[in-house]
Image: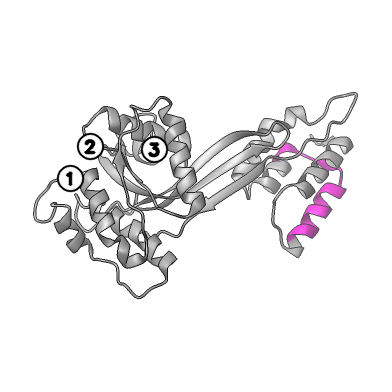
Amino acid sequence: MKKRISILSIVLTTLLILSSFSVSATGAQSWNNFWNSAEYTDEEIKNAIEKDSLSYKTYLNYKDNLFDESSVIAQVMPVEHTYTVPVTNFIQEKTNWCGPACVRQTLSFHRSKASNSFSLPSQTEIAKKLKVYGNSNGSLSTDIASTLNSYLSDFKVSGKYLSTDINDKSNPGEWLYSILKDEIKAKTYAPIVLVDTNDPNGLAQYTKYNEKIRHYNTISGVKEVEDANLGKIIERSVCRVDPHYKSTFSGSYWEVYANLYSSVSYADSHGPNKVLIY
């Protein structure tokens, strides 16, 4: 059954204008026709807004606070902040070469930033430096950092990568997030994290298929949703570039930060290898 909610139509129209949605001329006309009808169902709202699932979820969280029977309180829609660096996804050429592939992925960012003619080293070359060529060993994070550093001068980078654990920090979740955000926002480095997909609270893409491995990913983006009324971050996510040799897992994925952190923290707790190269 349809419900007439003219006050809510006015509020939502105002919020849509204030929000950061981008629509074509045709899309804008569709929005006008939709809201001008002043009658709509919950399903129509869902279909109209689901182009941006994050914004739709935020709408659901806010809809009960938009108005009451006696008054209308206009609220500013949450503001999204996104920071990214260009990272090319390279599929690992051997089952134990996620380290070499991630080194190459991270160097692709530095090459793009430097805009020079240096070619990226092959995974084979990197694997030899990481001591995983011709064997089934996994890469060590300390070796990944030193291998990255051996190439940085080619791409005009004066700093260097470090490797570290996170669980020894006073607030590891916030500490890791601040490192990822600061480096991506400043476009200085493309960090690498070690995840453990045995973590039941970690990466849903892996737990769904019961794929249990310790695995490196390059981080290429950070996204925050800020409650503009409270000046508070209400959602955080990161983009991970996964070099897995199976197409089910390889690619670039925006991940809820809490899930990524859980998987990295689990890796820290269940092995001696350092879990962050930054």
Q: Nearer the viewer, residue 178 or 225?
A: 178
Instruction: Return the x and y of residue 237 as percentages of the image width and height.
Output: 50, 41
Which residue in the protein does label 2 denote?
273
Depth check, mark 3 against mark 1: the one in front is 1
Mark 3, residue position: 203
Instruction: Name the residue: 38% across, 73% down.
Output: 116
Q: Is the Cβ of the residue at disc 2 closer than 8 Å to that at disc 1?
A: yes
User: Residue farthest to the right?
Assistant: 70
Give the magenta-colored segment's residue range.
27-43
Q: Regarding mark 3 in the picture, which secondary structure is present there?
A: loop
Image quarter of the N terminus: top right
Could you tell me residue 58's position as x and y percent? 65, 37
Residue type of the residue flagged with mark 2 = Asn
Q: Which mark is residue 85?
A: none
Residue at the spot of label 1: 138
N-term-proximal mark, 2 vs 1: 1
* Magenta highlight on residue 201: no
* Mark 1 surroundings within 10 Å by alpha-carbon count, few (fewer than 14), some (14 through 19), many (20 or more): some
- Compute the Cα span from label 2 to label 3: 19 Å
Kind of residue at badge 3: Leu
Query: Mark 3, residues whose alpha carbon is within 10 Å: few (<14), some, or many (≥20)?
Result: many
Secondary structure at numbered mark 2:
loop
Please report whichever mark, 3 or 1, sits nearer to the chain's N-terminal start: 1
Identify whether 146 is placed above or below 197.
below
